[in-house]
Each structure stands twice: as structure tokens, then as C-alpha cells.
Image (cartoon, rainbow, N blue to C red):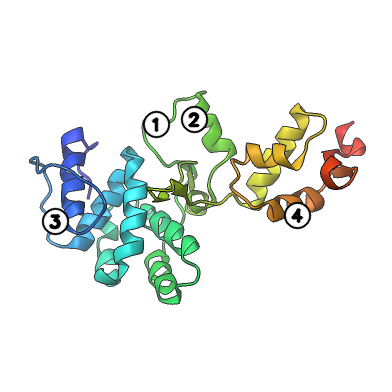
Amino acid sequence: MIKAIPTEKHLSRLYFELSQLGAACVGERFSWPYHPKHREEVLCLAADCSRYDPRLITILVRFVREHWQTFNPSLIRSFFKQMRTPQTIAVVAEFVRRQEKGNVDLGYFCEYLQRGIDPAPMQFYFHHLYHLGGRLAERAREKPLAEYKRWGFLACEAPRFDEKTRTTTGTLDAPTRRNILKKLLTHQREIRMSDYLDVLDHAVSRQQALIDLKTFKGIEQMGSRKGTRWRLHQAVNN
């Protein structure tokens, strides 16, 4: 579906097309090599292009969340064979599905879009964003959000659900949190819960952080209440 690496003008035109469909973005009507006939085709093209522009993830997640009832899911799936990576649609649906767990019908919609899609071979989600040995690449490898990881991608850029409050969405799965905690404890002999929450960018609740600290193997608790600290178990540390 995507013909080449999108230029700034092509992305601006894509924003324009999305805005005409109700998405929260602004663009200009520059010429481009695409002639989409359906809103579903624009969505799939934008999903393919999202690997070249992190801003599109936020735009698409919010767009699908707010306008999913205007889409024909069967028509969306009909464009999968033309896409370079249909897993991008699955990623968008994953963020929406996890954020809107209470909306049963929206959950079914997202699950249908994902049905039959195999995860991509593990790779960075965004092209040209992560440089070998760079800080962003290291962060994506160490703190990949579960919504990307489930579909074969490494990325830590969380879509922003609310522009006013700057609220983001995205989760870290248990294996990722365990690796982050072990690395933290190898650099710091002892930690408080606040240290763990900080390194997770507060992506989990205090209750979940406490469960992690108490249940992940090889970690022992010292003290209680406000003075509680955690460290690697001596048998593991030696």
C-alpha cells in the first residue's frame, strides 16, 4: 500500500485526509501518489506510515477509539494484503482495546481486526528513529510497551489519549518489568518502591509495583512500612 518512505508533504496530506474523516489532526492538501476511495483505506495507509512518524500512533489510536463505529471492519481487513505490515493495525487495535476494556462491542471490533494476524519477526516499530547503540534504541529494547511487543515490535512511545492532561496509555508486561527491576537492583544495592516506580515511568500502580517486589524471584524485603527497602537476595547477588 505504501509506495515509498513518506515525505513531509505526503504526511501533511495524510493528516489532511484523516482530518476530513474526523481525526484530531491538521494537514495540507499537497499532491501525493495515493487515491484512496474509502476511509478504511486511509486508515490502513496511515497505519503503514505510522512506522515513519510516531505522531501517527496517537492520532490513529484516538481516531479509532472515537470513530470505530464509522468503519467497516471487513473492508479494513480487505486491505491487509496490500499493506507492508498489517500488524500496525493490530497494534493500534491493541492500544484501543486495552484502554477501553469496559466497552465490549469495541473490544469485539478490535479483536476482529487482529484475528489471523501473526506477530512480525521481532524488530523496532519505528524506522529511522532508533540508531544502533543510541539511547532511544536501548530504551525501546529494555522498556518495550506490551501493545507493541505482542505484535513483534519494540517501541516505548505511548499514545497520548488526552491532550489536555497529557495522559498516555501503554503497559509493560511482567517479563519486561522483571528485567527492569533486576537491572535496577544490580546498579543500586537497595531500592525503595519509589525508585522502582520512577524507572518504570509510573506505568504501573503502586499496588502492582508492590506485587512485583513481593513476587518476583530473587528479591528480598528489608524493613516495613515507610522504611521498606528491597534488594537482590544474597544467594542471587553472590
Judging depth in this view, the residue of 103 and 1 nearest the camera is 103
Q: Residue furthest top?
A: 133
- Labels 3 & 2 near each other (Cβ < 8 A): no
Q: Residues within 10 Å of mark 3 (few under 14, many from 20)?
A: few
Q: CA distance from mark 2 to mark 4?
A: 28 Å
Q: Which mark is residue 129?
A: 1
Q: Residue at x 25, y 61 (%)?
A: 79
Q: Circle 3 sits on which residue? A: 36
Tag 2 residue: 136
- Amino acid under label 4? Ile
Query: Which residue is disc 4 drawn over?
Result: 211
Which SS class for mark 4?
helix
Q: Is residue 88 left or right of residue 172?
A: left
Instruction: Give the mark nearer the N terminus: 4 vs 3.
Output: 3
Q: Position of residue 43 (x, y in %)?
A: 25, 56
Q: Residue at x 18, y 40 (%)?
A: 12
Give the amino acid at mark 3. Answer: Pro
Q: Amino acid at mark 2?
A: Leu
- Label 1 is placed on what type of residue? Leu
- Closer to viewer: mark 3 or mark 2: 2
The answer to whether residue 157 is left or right of residue 52 is right
Q: Quadrant of residue 78?
A: bottom left
In the rendering, at what x and y percent does residue 19 appear? Answer: 19, 52
* Label 1 residue SS: loop
Q: Residue at x 52, y 49 (%)?
A: 149
Q: Are marks 1 and 2 in contact (CB under 8 Å)?
A: yes
